[in-house]
Amino acid sequence: MRISLPYARRSIVANVRDRNLMAIVKPRDLRGFENQQSAIRAALKDPIESDRISKMTGTGEKVAIIIDDTTRPTPTRKILQPILNELHEAGTRDRDITIVVANGLHRKSRRKEKERMIGKDILSTIEVRDHDARRTQAMVELGATSRGTPVWINKNVVEADLRVLTGHIGPHSMAGYTGGGKAILPGTSGIGTITADHGFQATADPKSVLGQIRGNPIREDIEEAAKMVGPCFIANVVMNSKDEIVEVVAGDMIKAHRVGTRVVDRMAKVALPRKADVVIAACNYPKDISLYQATCGIAAAFRLPVPIVREDGVIILLAECREGVGSVFFHRIMKMGSTPEDILERISQPNSWMQDQWAAQIWCTILKRTEIVVVTDGITKKTLTEMNISHATSVDEAIGIALKKVGKNAEIAVLPEAPCVIATLQNSSSRPQDLGDTQGALDSPPTAIDKYV
């Protein structure tokens, strides 16, 4: 069977024999709004468990609008103008508004990227600042969370009278879901705050996985830290796999966010009949911009209450990686040992934290149990081999490598939009509706499977 899979901004074809194909696993896309601007305005006018923005601020008060960086698919430009209209209605002047790009520990946004994300018109009238987690003089210390995480937050964010957190809500391999308070932590936090929140033990916690909120130490830390900053209003969107807006949630940072996660669950939570021998995970742009960002692709097969790939199976990751590995720190850690076990032993030591070790921890934890083959044009075989990762120049080559390892009768599950899926097993005790923060998240059983064998 010929299966079309996203690769960068185009598609490539995987040839999977019918006898090997167990399932093609896709999100159950909801229909996008025909008038997205109207949907955003409506959500802002009727926020969840919160006053409208126009009632929360006024003339002379400072407002910080926090936006995602270029590694996220959030349609920031569409969200910003309705927010600015609300602020102008309240009498807030442009000179009292600061847009903060929530880079976390990512690189700063380039001018062209800001023009695309924000628009030249807004760039010319509103101050836009990139967050730099390493500039301690630009941070304010607010204390510590109950987990002991020191809370250092961007001064522009802390000193504002109101914070408007924009973003999108989707599956996240550590915090359960994106969106909500993640604009604060890690988005606009200091490096010490991020490193503590993303520490080895928290990342290793069995509840720090896709689709899990209740009991998730990373999500709980995020929301506790965000509350310490002061009043936060969120304006988040939920998008389908075509990047169409299907829901807009605005208002209380937690309650509105949870409404959004339930919509995500309706699309993303899909049940497989059993574990696959091989999982083909394709990352859609911009998640495939680098190997570091494409971590979400392998996470979709493994970073779950119950992995959907069997022990000693194979994960095939499709990621163009136009920016290569994407993090010199991640790359360096992945070369620190001859085996994944060696690397995990080194980074698990107390006081040994290194930047981006969370990504290395996820990769090495998976590599201990499965082989990972990366189909990419952006990274050489030599570089991947140094990182204990296999390389292939085509999907068919990668399938050949996998079948040689696990046998010609292997069952293959294909995830064409891996970052958009939260896969479960039908016979697992972890039912889909138990994985979020609310009961009955699904209106009906997930059925987005093209084929069961």
Image: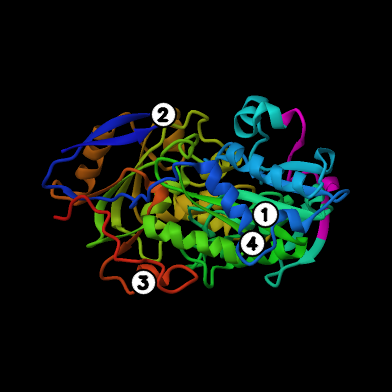
- Counting labels gives 4
Q: Horizontal and vertical percent for residue 42?
A: 57, 52
In this view, the residue in front, 17 or 225, is 225
What secondary structure is found at the residue carrying circle 2? loop
**Residue sticking out furthest to the right:** 60
The N terminus is located in which quarter?
Answer: top left
Q: Measure the C-alpha gap from mark 3 to mark 1.
A: 29 Å
Report the side of 249 relative to 210 (left or right): right
In the drawing, what numbered circle is on residue 229?
none
**Three-letter code for the amino acid on which mark 1 is drawn:** Ile
**Three-letter code for the amino acid on which mark 3 is drawn:** Ser
Tell me where the magenta segment starts and ends, as one range.
Answer: 123-141
**Three-letter code for the amino acid on which mark 4 is drawn:** Met
Q: Measure the C-alpha gap from mark 4 to mark 1.
A: 20 Å
In the drawing, what numbered circle is on residue 253?
4
In the drawing, what numbered circle is on residue 9?
2
Q: Horizontal and vertical percent for residue 236?
A: 57, 52
The mark nearer the N terminus, 2 or 3, is 2
